[in-house]
Amino acid sequence: MSTDLNGAGVLSALAGALAGGGVEIVDLSHVLSPEIPVMVLPPEFGQCQPVRIEEVSRYDARGPAWYWNTITLSEHAGTHFDAPAHWVTGRHLAQGTVDDLPLDHLVAPAVVLDFSAEAAADEDFILTRAHLEDWEAANGKIDPGCWVLFRTDWAQHVTTPKYLNLREDGPHSPGPDASAIEFLVHERGILGFGTETIGTDAGQGSHLSPPYPAHSILHGNGRYGLQCLAGLDRLPARGAILFAAPLKIRDGSGSPLRVLALVPGKGSAA
Ligand code: MN
């Protein structure tokens, strides 16, 4: 969209569109609760703890007029953000932790790649460069600086064993291979890659080359991950603006967060 609006005009127009329904807000986050599944690693490794919510008081003898909880969270529980420092490939990068991210990375456009049919047909569906080239042929080139969101409709499994889909040989869920992530990072200059599954990598991503290619390549190049997203079926293929600002945790490797998308609303002109 071309516009001659200055910044104040853009914000004024946005305020009007939000009030009038021309722009709507879509919540891309799951409820953060003790029931939300967390990553399970092989037993020789340290484990991510489940979410804990402990009541401090609730209009009772512990605090007659107020309600509050103490929460205990893994940085990687629920809908969450992965910073470059999460992976060893990104450990030495500047601005690699959640307390030090460039602010203009926290509000950015998003494209949504709908591979829900493929994921329904194959729980180990692997997204490749060829799939991305086909998507671009139909939908246009992926812009630099945008989030690429991989829609699999996996969010609908969040309360069921299918979400982690753990078997004797580990978890089974869709994800990208190295060719897809190399293409997105080096040839398209994306900001980050978002998924509905518990990680940005496929459940069987440890068997790819390199192992966990999304984590390895994204974070080694200063790019971000979003996981456990919901509501991707409510986003257009192009044109959404994503608000994804992790908590400002000192030296944090990631953070639960509320991810919101601005999308054209029903009240908007064509
Ligand atoms: Mn993570």
Image (cartoon, helix red, strand yellow):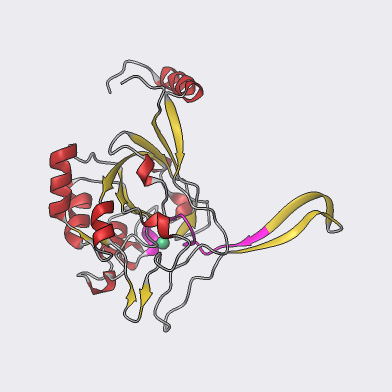
Q: 97 and 176: which one is in front?
A: 176
Q: Residue 106, image x and y in percent?
A: 42, 43
User: For residue 84: magenta?
Assistant: yes
* Residue 268 drawn at (x, y percent): 38, 22
Residue at the image point whose x is 41% and y is 22% from the top: 267
In which quadrant will I find the C terminus?
top left
Residue 7, quarter of picture: top left
Whether the magenta-drawn stretch holds residue 83 is answered as: yes
Question: Residue 119: x, y in percent?
Answer: 27, 58
Residue at 72% x, 53% y: name it: 68
Q: Residue at x 20, y 62 (%)?
A: 178
Asked if residue 20 lies left or right of residue 172, the reply is right
Give the camera-side residue of 59 and 147.
59
In the rendered image, the vertical position of residue 94 relative to residue 146, given as above or below: below
Quadrant in which the N terminus appears: top left
In the image, 49: left or right of 86?
right
Residue farthest to the bottom, as pictured: 44
Q: Which residues are magenta?
A: 70-86
Q: Is residue 82 visible?
A: no
Rendered-image quarter of ligand 1 = bottom left
Tell me the residue at 43%/41% (across/down). 103
Q: Position of residue 155 (x, y in %)?
A: 40, 55
- Tell me if residue 171 can be seen: yes
Give the image quarter of residue 54. Answer: bottom right
**Count the marks: how many?**
0
